[in-house]
Image (spheres, coloured by chain):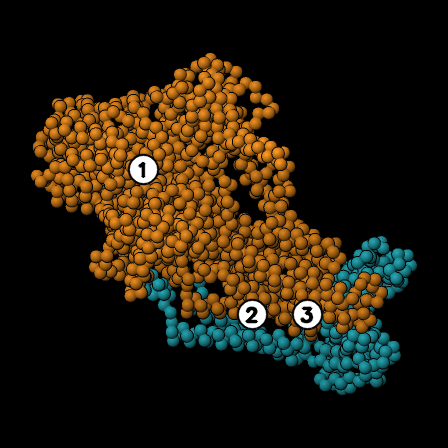
Amino acid sequence: MEHPNKPKNSAFKQQRLKAWQPILTPRPVITTFFIVGAVFVIIGVALTVSTNKVKESKIEYTDCPLNSTCTKSIEISDKLSSPVYMYYQLTNYHQNHRRYVKSRSDKQLRGEKVSFKDLEICKPRRSLDDSSSPDKIYIPCGLIAYSKFTDIFELGDGASNFTLSKGDIAWNSDVTKKFQNPNPFPVGIEIQRNFEDPDFVNWMRVAALPTFRKLYAKIDQDIEKGTYNLYINNTYEVSSFDGTKTIILTTTSWAGGKNIFLGSAYLALGSFIIGIGIFCLITHLVAPRKLADTTYLPWKS
Amino acid sequence: MKKQKKKEQKKQKQNEQKKQRKIIITDQERGKDFPFVGNSIKTTKYNILTFLPKNLFEQFRRLANFYFLIVIILEYFPFSPLNPTVSVLPLIFVLTITAIREAYEDIQRNKSDSKINNSPTICLRNGSFQTMKWKDLKVGDIVKITNGKFFPADIVILSTSEPMNMCYIETCNLDGETNLKIRQGLQVTSFLNNNENELSNFQATIDSELPNNRLYKFNGALNFNEETHSLSNTQMLLRGCALKNTKWIIGVVIFTGSDSKIMKNSTDPPSKRSTIEKQLNIRLISIFIFLGIIGLVGAFFSGYWQHKWGGSKSWYMGDEVNHDNLSPVLIGVYGFFSFIIVCNVMIPISLYVTMEMVKLIQTIFINHDIDMYHDETDTPAKARTSNLSEELGIIEYIFSDKTGTLTCNIMEFMKCTIGGIKYGNGVTEVAIAAAKREGRILENNRKKNEPAFNDDNLLNNLHQKTQSSQMIHEFLTMLSVCHTVIPEKNQENESEIIYQASSPDEGAFVQAARLLGYRFHKRTPNSITVEIEGKDETFEILNVLEFNSTRKRMSIIVRTEDGTIKLYTKGSDSMIMERLSQESQDVDVTNNHLEEFAKDGLRTLCFAMRVIPEDEYQKWNKNFHKANIAIENRQEKLDESAEEIENNLQLIGASAIEDKLQEGVPDAIEELSKAGIKIWVLTGDKRETAINIGFACSLLTQNMTIITISGNDLQSTKNALESAIKENSNLDDNDDIMKKNRNLGLVIDGATLEYALNGDAKFSLLQLAQMCSAVICCRVSPLQKALIVKLVKDNLDVISLAIGDGANDVSMIQSAHIGIGISGQEGMQAVLSSDYSIAQFRFLKKLILVHGRYSYRRITKLIVYSFYKNMAFSIMQVYFAIFAAWSAQTLFDSFLISIFNVVFSSLPIVVISVLDQDVSQDAELRYPQLYSDRSRNFLFSFTRFWVWLFQGIYQGAIMFFIPYFIWKFEPLSSNGQVLGMWGMSTTIYTSLIITINLKIALETTFWTWMHHLTIWGSIVVWFLFAVIYNANLKISSKMFHVVFQTLKLPNIWLQILFVVVLSLFPDFVYKYLSRYYRPHYWQIIQEQEKIKPKKSINTVNSFNMQEPFLVDSAEELDKLLITEKMNLNEMNYIVDGKSEKFTGFAFSTPHNSSFGIVDKNLTLTFYDEDGENQISEKEL
């Protein structure tokens, strides 16, 4: 008899594929707890040690009068060894606001020719009074560029100032590719002449949170313990939105700047996991459950 | 006033006209005004023009689709943070896939329609018979149908090839009955022969009722020769029936196409949605509410932020030069919609596509399951819908038809006892099941096509001329003589005989006798001819004393060739035993044998005879004739008269017939009830037959208390029900174990159900039924079947499944949550209206326990996981909003948002919801209890759903806030450069992809290569994608090089590691501890499977009894209970005072048998299908 309708006996269709069937039995699970816990503690220690090596000094200068130069003295309590990074930090500043984030034209910033229509996205800072006449267009357009950070800093010990290097403070890919100066420079209202300027580039890379730091400069020499002068050309308004401005000098480790959070978190979680491991181990030793114990099946008991 | 009256009169007249249609036979001038529909049928939903709008409309009625439509519309507004294309593409994808499926299904329907519409038939047109297509038939056409053909429309018979203008039809497609029925044309038209000229000149009209759905009634009149002859159902041949045993008929088409009775009866199959899908909508609404709350929170805070910090304060926002209206209220209103748009992914659009895909694959598994393939009929299982596979996983009630579903509808002569000697070696299904319970393995060695009765001793003893041989001779003679079977000669092979038996038992007797050398081959109105060992012997039939349910026996009085008058009686043991003569021998031995037979689930009948002296017979016959012509109380008088002659009998023996259960039915029923499923048998059979089968298929067991309810009005039925409840619930209170074992069986018949399904009684019925582990409803009509299913479905919050094979089961199949049709046999009605079709009842076990259970677990996992991951994904937008001035800035790049579901998180869950197995199929079948373990109701509960969502909310919080605390203190790199928003976004996105993929890894314990490929693959794909997406300014200038700058940093990797571990840790610990200390049953089985070496794949149907695990301790309890309950073993709650006992006897005669031979004057009696009214009686 022919069987044209007979299904094929394939492993897939008969749901009999070969499979690895791991289940959470005590031995591997408890072992995992201990291993993961131990690894986490080790990472935690490593992070804590390295973050403790990072030295940081900061000075808030929000109180400096606007549109004037201002000098603040900054206390370096531990020696900062080269390279030292200088950041400005703003607070309550929403670079991540939706209307702010979108208000830029990457095409324009790449130095490409753009039409007025292309710049629609830059509104409300597309052009002066949103006029379509070419000479009223902001170069580059958009809220981000328009609100670029304008304070200028010098750091010195009274006798001489440190060299504030701008090399390598912005992503190489940004400086060389993402931002390119237009040639020739178009007519319009100039906001930023040099698109490839690392400070401008850093500003244009919007921050994730309303408290953010941006790298201002790199100092390629050690800064000994002591008190130094910070000269500020203070032009940038933050008080209207209750913001603050701070200058931070810091060294870095392999894990970045000073941040005890991650190391502590690792230590805490690692210890907790080990604790759970110990708990499970003890309960397993004291009141073990026989695997595949049929007394748990009601139709058996 | 007058005018009005006139109007009314006119109206009335019109109405009168409308009450009937006038048909002019072979009206040659059927022009444009021809008022009747054509004969083509159309079951399709769409046509080319209506497809698009209708289908779209249907699809947008789905809550989720409609929601996405709204979201897309919102996205076109300027306040939208997302580009509409982000949502349009997935929605179009979803709609297209569904539309393609719908179109495909409709095309299939169209194909089957056109196949039917184009079937050939013979019709008289232009004076000659022509072969035409069904669809071209018109009302008034004269058609000729030949033997075996289906009727293309509803037809009134004019003439037939048979005497008396009769014909036989099979109505299997209409009512599931396989025995032939008689239809008869009017005598006035019987002169019309198969002659084209004569027919062409035939002029008559028919007044018929309007098309309706009454299958068993027809009113009409034939106007011919200026005389009116009334037409009834007897002249009616319905579309869907087939002509049998008749060379040809000539008839007039009355109702065509959609007007035909069968089409009027077919309602659109109710579109069934699974419980999960309905629950899903409720879950969806809960998410909509959640989303709404997010929207409101977002609206409030965005407005508040604008109020507090907007305008000249946050000058960098340029609000002062912004020409848009930035009033806080408006910002708030925009904020509401913006947040809904940003979080719209909370409802996973891909879920529906994924679900359809997964369900489709689940149907493939069902369709290709080799264990559900029936070799003999070459029929695989078939899922006719993909919607309900998970519904199979939560069945609590099964409603089963009996004939053709539990049984094969084949009666087989299995054993007999003659003169105190038992013959027959066959093994019954029941015996096999009983042996299994006792831990023995009994096998059926019988080969296919071998007769069920095999015992050489019978023939040996027959041929040794002893007393025993005389008894055997009488026994075999009885088998071949005492019945109402009609032999039908095969047209091709004269020597081959087909027996047309209205009672399958009798068919089996005649068949068995023939195989033993007593070949019954000819019946005339007053004789039966049997070829006994090569020699014809003719028995003159003197009287037939019919079977009925009070007599429970039937007798035939014959005159043999040597002139002796013999009375042959067969009937239930109780009836026969009390009418035996004193001298009867072997009564005790026979009784013992009968008991043995009954234990094996066989239907037994006793055979007895008596030689009647001529004078006694003549005397009695006079009385009998008197009774036969009595006008009042004829039946009672006939019974009385029969009583006079049926006594002093000599016992010959007894037969045992197997109402052949389908293979594996008792086992399947037993296993399914272990799975916590209640099984109700709904059958048209008599009570005894039904109870017999109940025992045979393990539904009823010997230690069960059987409650029989019968009542003849509403009040008595209710009382009977209530007293039964009272009596049995008292027992329960005292004995908790008993309640657990639910050792009650309920038997109720259709007549009683008539009342029991009404008013308050139905709640009593329901209450009683719930107390019973088995319910048998006998003599129920198709409608009652559906009503019973509906009663349970509507009043108990349970999922029901109905299984049946015949057209009489259609309504039941359609009203249950899941309908199953038995395929592979004749008559496809049940299959066509079912959701799944299987060839054998036993396949139900695998369909439910394996496919249902897997599907349910898989689908629920798919749903909760899909919502979980999307919740984790979109809730982060809210966390981010806290720090982003509630501006609804998206945390992720919009392209990444749109492909999140499809690319990085869809395949693993698809693989898992297709392949996941918590325990093996073998274990599911071995431990049916797994089907109802305590996790089952939990799997898609509201709580579980939100527990999963809270996992998403928790993990989202971890994934966002851990980076938050770190990003506040940039730099994260040793070179001092900062990463900014898109760096943080990339980090979080990476943690998200890894977390949700590891989460699904935690959720499965079944790892095939596909799991590895998709789970690890999804993570790898993200990195590959990120590299490509970030590499080029043209692709995305926003994300340009972000991933390289970010993921090169050790700090970032440590964040990701931390986030992933912390996200999953609580879940992992919970999983371990709950498995360890509060294991689910399936987890225990899982461990068992892991520890013990896997058994070979073929263990599905073999049962290893050595395994202590398999012994059901409940059985031991049962044994204890038996002793206590012996006396209670049978309770009858019968109100009409007649208490009946059943002792394994059943004699199957369909109560609506269309013909019975009554006495030597051979009266042909026609009953209409209600079995009530005699329509006509004619003498031959």
Residues at discs 3 and 2 both on one chain: yes
Q: Which mark is residue B661?
A: none
Q: Is residue A272 above or below residue B275?
A: below
Colour in which the image shows chain B? orange
Q: Position of residue A184 (x, y in %)?
A: 89, 57
Q: Position of residue A11 (x, y in %)?
A: 44, 47
- Any part of residue B425 in sight: no
Whether residue B931 is situated above or below residue B54 in the rendered picture? below
Q: Residue at x 78, y 86 (%)?
A: A227
Foreground: disc 3 or disc 1 = 1
Q: Of label 3 and label 1, which has the lower sequence position?
A: 3
What residue sits right under mark 2 in the picture?
B1062
Horizontal relation, residue A253 to residue B320: left or right: left
Q: Which chain has been coloured cyan in this picture?
A: A
Q: Secondary structure at mark 2?
A: helix
Measure how far apart labels 2 and 1 are at the Cα level. 72 Å
Disc 2: CA contacts within 10 A as few (<14), some (14-19) or many (>=20): some
Evaluate if marks 3 and 1 touch, with contact meaning CB atoms under 8 Å apart: no
Q: Are marks 2 and 1 on the same chain?
A: yes
Can residue B356 be seen here? The reply is: yes
- Per the image, label 1 sits on a secondary structure element best described as loop
Q: Earlier in the sequence, mark 3 or mark 2?
A: 3
Instruction: Measure how far apart labels 3 and 2 are at the Cα level.
Output: 22 Å
Nearer the observer, B741 or B1134? B1134
- Residue on which disc 3 sits: B882
Are there few (<14), some (14-19), or many (20+) residues within 10 Å of tag 1?
some
Find disc 1 in the rendering and name its residue. B1151
* Mark positioned earlier in the residue sequence (2 or 1): 2
Residue at the image position 51 percent from the left and 32 percent from the top:
B19
Residue drawn where x is 68% and y is 66% of the image: B298
Kindly identify which chain the residue marked by label 3 belongs to: B
Q: Amino acid at mark 2?
A: Leu
